[in-house]
Structure formats: structure tokens, C-alpha cells
Image (cartoon, rainbow, N blue to C red):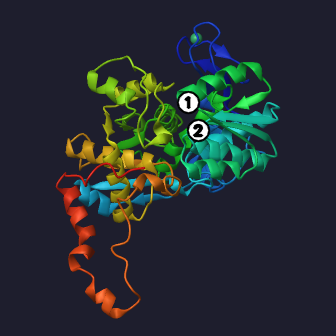
Amino acid sequence: MGFVKGLRCRECGRSYPAAALHVCDYCFGPLEVAYDYERAAASVSRASIAAGPASIWRYADLLPVSAQSPVDLGAGFTPLVRADRLAAELGLGELYIKDDTRNPTGSFKDRVVSVALTKARELGFKVAACASTGNLANSVAAHAARAGMDSYVFVPADLEHVKIQTTAVFGGKLIAVNGNYDDVNRLCAELASEHDDWAFVNVNVRPYYSEGSKTLAFEVAEQLGWQAPDHVVVPIASGSQLTKIHKGFHELTTIGLIEGGDNVRISGAQATGCSPVASAFSDGSDIVRPVRPSTIAKSLAIGNPADGWYALQVARSTGGAIGSVTDPEIVEGMRLLARTEGIFAETAGGVTIATLAKLAAAGIVRRDERVVAYVTGTGLKTVEALGDSVGPMGVIAPTLDAFAALDQATLDQATRDRDAFDQGTRPQEGTQA
Ligand SMILES: [Zn+2]
């Protein structure tokens, strides 16, 4: 908080106070938090960060809020897991998984919401609100409960059942909307202008909210012993997370805590059924054309991504790429990560891992690079996406004879699936919910 200069337009550079503003009055460009990096560099050190709590709040000096009384469920400082078995399968060398399934409500959204609601409370808001594809809904409802704030959470009515239940349990006002995320988001933009006493985390306090994603870069650098990775792979929904990971590595470099943070190659991952940014990338176009999403990766199903253009520029300027994968490939990615590293990711994690596999096969993510894949949410919320692709090998009577009678070929099924993936073939399609 001490180093915030205010808000600044990402397009025309005009300055604004650090209030509940998100759009430039002059050019309608998005506003972003600006810091005094010279002063930050003089006072923030590796030691001062290490002395902080094992959560995002150890980086409070680089966040736009005061850490005096954060709205905190313990988000962040999740494990950075060395993934040698996955690396071997993908033909990569030094590979890590940033395991953000391990957040309080099971996704990286706890990082951004903790920052957003802390700022909202600072600004005097009593009500938290959001449009969500599910993970944000969980997190806003939980953090609002923690803060004693009222909450209004709007989600598409066809969301995974688990994400509805795991939001509603926190007792806020949950409203299901007949429409896709982009419809919900449009409704929320209208509601935000009618209810200026509500803190819409991804509308009027979005500049603060999105800063929480920088901690995904901060933690990776610190966990690598204050070194930058060579290449990271990040899922793209709105595109905000990818651009903030870029900003995070840049800031650590600017204030002298790491070297080479501006050389990190940043690649993006989308589901083919909602891949406006990946399409623009592969077309060599600067225009991110909105699409109507159709994918099992509902947490990434944003057809008109607010930060899509910026994500595209980051991938291009850093030498990264943006790939996309089909629904069956997403399920395979989830299963591959689970059986090699013991990490059960949601569909978005399947998107990241399957895209990583593709980029590795294409030689874009290289064996000589230190690579980090961001796995941003737990598979327990999207179990239905697995459909019949996994299950028991057989149902038997509780006797030794029955077990002995099990067909060995059936028991070998898991091994065959693995071989199939290695050979680049996929199991039968059409089994997903
Ligand atoms: Zn502007």
C-alpha cells in the first residue's frame, strides 16, 4: 500500500487516484495500479518478504492494499512441485507445477479475491459482488463470509453442480442466470452502474483484484531461490492472470530481487471450444474476435476476454505461444497430471497440461528450459468432466477366487491408456459430461 502512486490508464497513461475506478474517462482504456518502484526497491528485500506470513500477504508491499487487516483465508504460498515424471513423459527437462489447487477454496481466485475484498473494505464497501464461471463465485462467497460482508454472486445456470453448492454454502446471495458467462458479465456491468455501493470484484475494483495474480509470479521466483524461470504456461480465461504474471516477474526485476524476469517466455493455454486468443495468435492477428464458448473447461469459457489483447501481446513480445486443446485432450491432460504427479486438477489444469504437451511436442517449450506450468484449480469441482474415462477396473465378489478370476487384460487397461497417450492417440471421445 505504501508504494501505490494511484491508478494509470494502460492506453493513454493518464493518472487517477486509487479509488473504485476501472475505466479511463478519456479513452475508455482499462486502469491499472501504478507503484513507486524506486521507493519500493529501497525498502523491500528478499529478507523482508521471507519474514512475512506463508501466504500472499508476504508480498503486501507489492500489492495495492494495506496488510494491516487483510480479508484473509490463507490464500497463496502454494507448493511449487518439481514434476520429473511428467517431464519425462513430455520430453522436457526441469519442469515444475505451481499447484494452486491448494488454496482455501481450491483455486487461484483466492489470491485476487483476498486483495479485492481487502481493498473494498478499505474503500468502505459493505457488499461484495461478482460475475463468475464458478471458482470466483466460491472465493467471493467465502471471503465475504469471512469479512462479514454481504455478497451477490452471479453465475451461468449451467455451471457444474459442485461449484453452485460450494458457493451457496457460504450463505451469500447466489443468483443463477440463464445465459453464458458473457451474458452474466454484461448483466453485472449494468448492475454495477446501478449499485455503486457494491464492490464488483471484476468490475469497479478490478484494477486491485487483478493485482493479486502477480503473487503467482512472486512465489515462483522465490520458490526457485529468487530466480526467474525460462518459460511459463498459463491458462487464459479473461487473460488477466497471464498479463499479471508477466507484470509480477517484471516488478521483481525492476526492484532488484531477481535477474532476467523480463526474459521469461510466457505461453498461454485455451480450450479449442473457447479459443479467441489462441486463434488470434495462430492467425497472426491483433484482433481477438469474440466467440460463443462450447467446452468442458467452463472456468475458462470467456468468449470475449477483457484482457485477451494484452495477453496476446505478452505472449508475442516474450517469445511465447498460445495453444488450444480439445475437450478429450483436456481430460487426457487431467489424467496425465494425476497419474504422473498425484495432482488432481480441474478442467483448466487439463487445458494447461495438454497445451504444455503440445507446445513441448512442437519444440516451442524446450527441454533445456526451466518450465513452470500453472495449475489453477482443483479437480474435485469438475469431477463430472471425467465422465466414464476413469473408474473401477472391475466389480467382484469379496473373495480371493473372484479377484483371481479378473481378466489380466482388464487390469492392464491403465497401462494401455498410458501407451496410447504416449503415442499421441487419444481414447474414445464423447464420454464427457
Ligand atoms: Zn486513457
Disc 2 residue crowd, few under 14, some 14–19, many 20+, Cα 10 Å: some
Identify the residue shown where x is 39% and y is 24%.
313
| Camera-nearest residue between 141 and 249 | 141
Instruction: Work out whether 288 lies above or below 121.
Output: above
Relative horizontal placement of residue 43, taking residue 271 as reference (left or right): right
Give the image location of residue 403, x and y in percent. 32, 87
Residue farthest bottom in this picture: 400
Question: Looking at the image, can residue 62 be seen?
Answer: yes
| Residue projecting furthest to the left | 423
Q: Where is residue 204 in the image (x, y as percent from the top left)?
A: 68, 25
Left or right of residue 270: residue 30 = right
At x 48% / y 31%, what residue is drawn? 302
* Amino acid at pointer 2: Ala
Residue 179 has which mark? 1
Question: Where on the picture, by quarter, is residue 235?
Answer: top left
Q: How far apart are marks 2 and 1 (CA)?
A: 7 Å
Q: Where is residue 211 in the image (x, y as percent from the top left)?
A: 59, 35
Asked if marks 2 and 1 touch (Cβ < 8 Å), the reply is yes
Quarter in which the N terminus is drawn: top right
The residue pinned by badge 2 equals: 157
- Sequence-earlier tag: 2 or 1: 2
Depicted 297 relative to depicted 183: above or below = below
User: Quarter for ligand 1?
Assistant: top right
